């Protein structure tokens, strides 16, 4: 039911053809070569396996009439890569369609939810939450390069603060999960505790298992480990390098798979940021900003594989990016207002100017991150604040909150509440359209 409302929201106004033309320019113009993989005409969309200047004689890898693209647009986010491939083959055979009503592949994952009522207004809504990174001990935070020990000199004394991002994201996710569940939503977390990866095991356990060829092969088969990464496993890499070069991307791919398998109406990817210029992260910084990322900005390297090109097609014709901008915009405004943290402009971080494209929403940027690329559908990828900020580091290490035995800083309750309020506002604007 929720999915139907969400797609209906995006489908109004522009046709898929108009949307795709506009989107190609708005969100895929960072790497000019990307446009050479696609040709848009008045009748059809063509996708090619190589980047080159196109003419009519080139044979496309995939071709879609705009009526087929419109038909696919409403369901492409619920399809696996294999389903999408066979659907494209099928559509090519039948060439054109006008209505999706009788399509046997139409997914109806959202029927059967509890009826919505005043105290259960989110009944039937499916939300996937990805608490960024892994966390656990400080040593694990160090392995994944997501922890810091900050010194802050004030009033003649020096205070020390130790932060582990993967714990902050996990507790924020738990708090948000509880809020959504109380209103009837069905919520899935990509990892179930601090120190656990999305594979449901620790990094240490994964290092033990990966020594067995059968386990490594199973990851290759599941599309989580590339042949290049498999070769890297033969080298004796230290923990930090092994994490950065192999395990991190396996874990990331599994997070996206878990979220997509869950067929969420929307996904929330939770992170806490740092000042990129404060390298070493030993001292605090006066800077503090909030920002969010949505998909787009793919680079031509992403399109070298068929999977990458199918994903590009999905980003182009699904309403995912537009819906994500709308959701993210609501979340960003609540985060900024409730935390008292300014919204980042393009000039506030070099990666915003260099690697991102601005969207129509303040503080929401199109960026080619693994999870904005691989996660289907509507998402908010939020960076709520800078952990290394003078004031934030004190608040984030206060341990003044307690929920079901977990001790955490109360500061993150504001973050969870802002995500929650943003989601409610987003859903209400769809209903009122
Ligand atoms: Zn992060």
Image: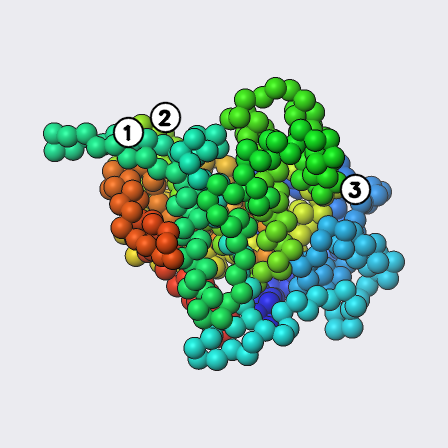
Q: Nearer the viewer, mark 1 or mark 3?
A: 1
Q: In the figure, 52 relative to 60: above or below?
A: above
Q: Nearer the viewer, residue 423 or 8?
A: 423
Q: CA distance from mark 1 to mark 3?
A: 56 Å
Helix, strand or loop at label 3? It is loop
Q: How many marks?
A: 3
> Is the Cβ of the residue at disc 1 closer than 8 Å to that at disc 2?
yes
Which residue is identified by label 1? 283
Look at the image and name its color scheme.
Answer: rainbow
Distance Cα–Cα, label 1 vs label 2: 8 Å
Secondary structure, mark 1, is loop
Query: Neighbour class for label 3 at 10 Å: few (<14), some, many (≥20)?
Result: few
Q: Is residue 291 visible?
A: no
Q: Residue at x 30, y 57 (%)?
A: 338
Q: Residue furthest left?
A: 156
Q: Residues within 10 Å of mark 1 (few under 14, many from 20)?
A: some
Residue 29 in the image: state x and y as whole percent.
Answer: 58, 42
Percent x, y of residue 21: 63, 53
Q: Residue furthest right?
A: 93
- Residue at 42% from the left image edge and 58% from the top image edge: 176
Give the vertical position of 181 relative to 160 (above or below). Answer: below
- Quadrant in which the N terminus is drawn: bottom right
Image quarter for residue 10? bottom right
Q: Which secondary structure lies at badge 2?
A: loop
**What residue would you read off at disc 2?**
280
> Which residue in the structure is indicated by mark 3?
55
Q: Choose between 234 and 34: the one closer to the eye.
A: 234
Badge 2: residue crowd in 10 Å (few <14, some 14–19, many ≥20): few
**Measuring 64% from the left and 34% from the top, which residue is drawn there?**
209
Residue at (51% x, 46% y) in the render: 366
Tell me if I can see residue 197 in this picture. Answer: yes
Q: Position of residue 288 (x, y in %)?
A: 31, 42
């Amino acid at each position: 039911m929720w999915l139907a409302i969400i797609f209906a929201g995006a489908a109004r106004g522009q046709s898929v053809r108009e949307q795709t033309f506009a989107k190609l320019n708005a969100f895929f113009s960072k790497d000019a070569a990307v446009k050479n993989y696609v040709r848009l005409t008045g009748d059809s969309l063509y996708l090619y396996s190589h980047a080159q200047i196109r003419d009519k004689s080139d044979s496309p890898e995939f071709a879609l009439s705009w009526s087929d693209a419109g038909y696919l647009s409403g369901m492409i986010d619920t399809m696996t890569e294999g389903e999408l491939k066979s659907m494209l083959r099928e559509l090519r055979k039948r060439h054109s369609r006008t209505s999706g009503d009788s399509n046997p592949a139409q997914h109806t994952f959202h029927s059967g939810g509890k009826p919505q009522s005043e105290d259960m207004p989110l009944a039937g809504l499916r939300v996937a939450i990805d608490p960024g990174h892994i966390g656990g001990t400080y040593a694990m935070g160090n392995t994944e390069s997501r922890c810091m020990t900050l010194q802050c000199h004030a009033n003649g004394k020096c205070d020390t603060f130790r932060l582990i991002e993967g714990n902050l994201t996990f507790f924020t996710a738990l708090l948000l999960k509880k809020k959504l569940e109380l209103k009837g939503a069905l919520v899935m977390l990509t990892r179930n505790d601090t120190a656990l990866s999305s594979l449901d095991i620790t990094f240490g356990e994964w290092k033990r298992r990966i020594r067995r060829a059968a386990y490594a092969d199973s990851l290759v088969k599941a599309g989580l480990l590339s042949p290049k990464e498999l070769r890297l496993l033969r080298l004796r890499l230290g923990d930090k390098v092994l994490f950065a070069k192999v395990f991190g991307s396996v874990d990331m791919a599994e997070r996206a798979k878990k979220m997509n398998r869950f067929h969420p109406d929307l996904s929330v990817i939770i992170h806490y940021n740092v000042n990129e210029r404060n390298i070493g992260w030993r001292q605090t910084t006066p800077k503090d900003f909030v920002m969010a990322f949505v998909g787009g900005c793919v680079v031509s390297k992403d399109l070298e594989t068929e999977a990458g090109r199918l994903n590009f097609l999905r980003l182009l014709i699904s309403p995912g990016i537009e819906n994500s901008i709308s959701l993210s915009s609501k979340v960003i405004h609540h985060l900024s207002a409730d935390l008292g943290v300014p919204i980042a402009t393009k000039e506030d971080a070099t990666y915003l100017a260099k690697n991102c494209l601005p969207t129509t929403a303040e503080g929401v940027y199109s960026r080619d991150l693994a999870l904005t690329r691989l996660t289907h559908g509507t998402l908010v990828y939020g960076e709520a604040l800078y952990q290394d900020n003078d004031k934030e580091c004190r608040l984030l290490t206060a341990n003044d909150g307690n929920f079901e035995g977990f001790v955490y800083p109360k500061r993150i309750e504001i973050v969870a509440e802002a995500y929650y309020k943003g989601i409610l506002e987003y859903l209400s604007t769809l209903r009122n359209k």
